[in-house]
Image (spheres, rainbow, N blue to C red):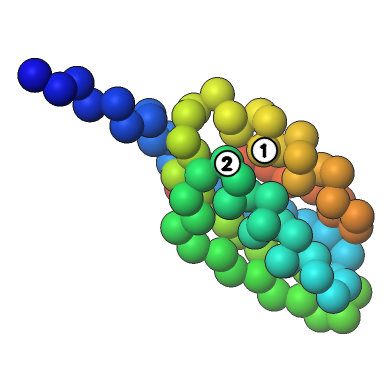
């Protein structure tokens, strides 16, 4: 009998606020995809700020803290926080 070796999936929704610039959303999604499967991304920008939401199924529940730390290193990121769906 083969045991299921698939990783634990933990869903998370993040609210992200940063300064609007070329490549900002691309960096958010590129960094996030290293930590899990992105379910949805929604951003709005007004030329000054960029605000959005990212839903991700994390490969392991303990990776959320590491993802948030990595996102905080993005140039222009002001705030990232987990929100309850």
Task: Return the residue at label 1.
Answer: 67
- Disc nearer the start of the sequence (2/1): 2
Does the rendering let one see residue 7?
yes
Residue 58 at x, y = what percent? 49, 39
Quarter of the figure with the N terminus: top left
Residue 45 at x, y = what percent? 77, 76
Judged by depth in the image, the label closer to the viewer, 2 or 1, is 2
Does the rendering let one see residue 14?
no
Marks 2 & 1, CB-CB < 8 Å contact: yes
Residue placed farthest to the front in the image? 1
In the image, residue 81 sits, relative to residue 63, either above or below, namely below
Residue 10 at x, y = what percent? 43, 35
Graded by Cα atoms within 10 Å as few (under 14), some (14 to 19) or many (20 or more), the crowding at tag 1 reads: some
In the image, residue 72 sits, relative to residue 61, either above or below, namely below
44 sits to left or right of 64: right
Task: Return the residue at label 2.
Answer: 35
66 sits to left or right of 84: right
């Amino acid at each position: 009998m083969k045991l299921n070796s698939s990783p634990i999936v933990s869903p998370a929704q993040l609210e992200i606020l940063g300064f609007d610039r070329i490549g900002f959303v691309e960096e958010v999604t590129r960094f996030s995809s290293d930590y899990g499967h992105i379910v949805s991304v929604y951003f709005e920008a007004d030329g000054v700020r960029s605000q959005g939401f990212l839903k991700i199924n994390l490969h392991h529940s303990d990776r959320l803290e590491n993802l948030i730390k990595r996102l905080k290193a993005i140039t222009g990121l002001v705030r990232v926080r987990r929100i309850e769906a």
